[in-house]
Image (spheres, rainbow, N blue to C red):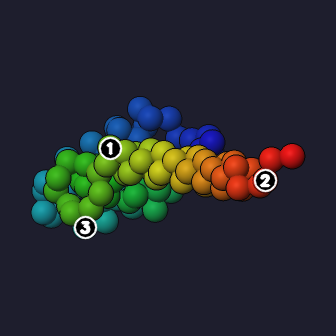
Amino acid sequence: MPAPRKYPDELRERAVRMVMEVRRDPAAAAGAIGRIAGQLGVHPEALRGWVKRAEIDGGQRPGTTSSDAQRIAELERENRELRRANGILRSASAFFAAELDRPAR
């Protein structure tokens, strides 16, 4: 289970929107994350991560989108469960095969 979020989703979205708007102006783009983080009371590295994630999800930066990452995690969980079930079935078939090979009394 993931850790509880420190900042509400509305704050995250608002902060990312503010950074994106400020970055449109080349004169104000430098240090935009630090300034906006200070205004909103958010740690600058947290805001930098949110902006990076928004850029990846928006196709402005290369990387794995949030939806793709979630789907990959689901597939990996399913794969682990299927491997576990396959191991159980393999053990059971070996057990029953050994029972069939024993001479009957």
Image quarter of residue 32: bottom left
- Mark number displayed over residue 67: 1
Residue bearing mark 2: 103
Residue 104 x/y as whole percent: 80, 47
- Quadrant position of the N terminus in the picture: top right
- Mark number displayed over residue 87: none
Residue 29 x/y as whole percent: 21, 62
Residue bearing mark 3: 30
Identify the residue at image location x=86%, y=46%.
105
31 to the left or right of 70: left
Q: Look at discs 3 and 1 and give the one toward the viewer.
A: 1
| 83 over 8 or under it: above or below | below
Identify the residue at image location x=78%, y=53%.
103
Give the spatial CA distance, label 2 vs label 3. 82 Å
Report the amino acid beneath label 2. Answer: Pro
Residue 69 visible somewhere in the drawing = yes
58 to the left or right of 8: left
Residue nearest the observer in this picture, 19 or 102: 102
* Residue lying at the far bottom of the rendered structure: 30
Identify the residue at image location x=25%, y=55%.
56
- Find numbered disc 3 in the image and state the secondary structure of the residue it sits on: loop
Report the amino acid beneath label 3. Answer: Ala
Residue 40 x/y as whole percent: 45, 45
Image quarter of residue 10: top left
- Mark earlier in primary sequence (1, 2): 1
- Mark earlier in primary sequence (3, 1): 3
Identify the residue at image location x=47%, y=51%.
79
- Would you call the spot at circle 1 few (<14 residues within 10 Å), some (14-19), or many (20 or more)? few
Residue 37 x/y as whole percent: 43, 53
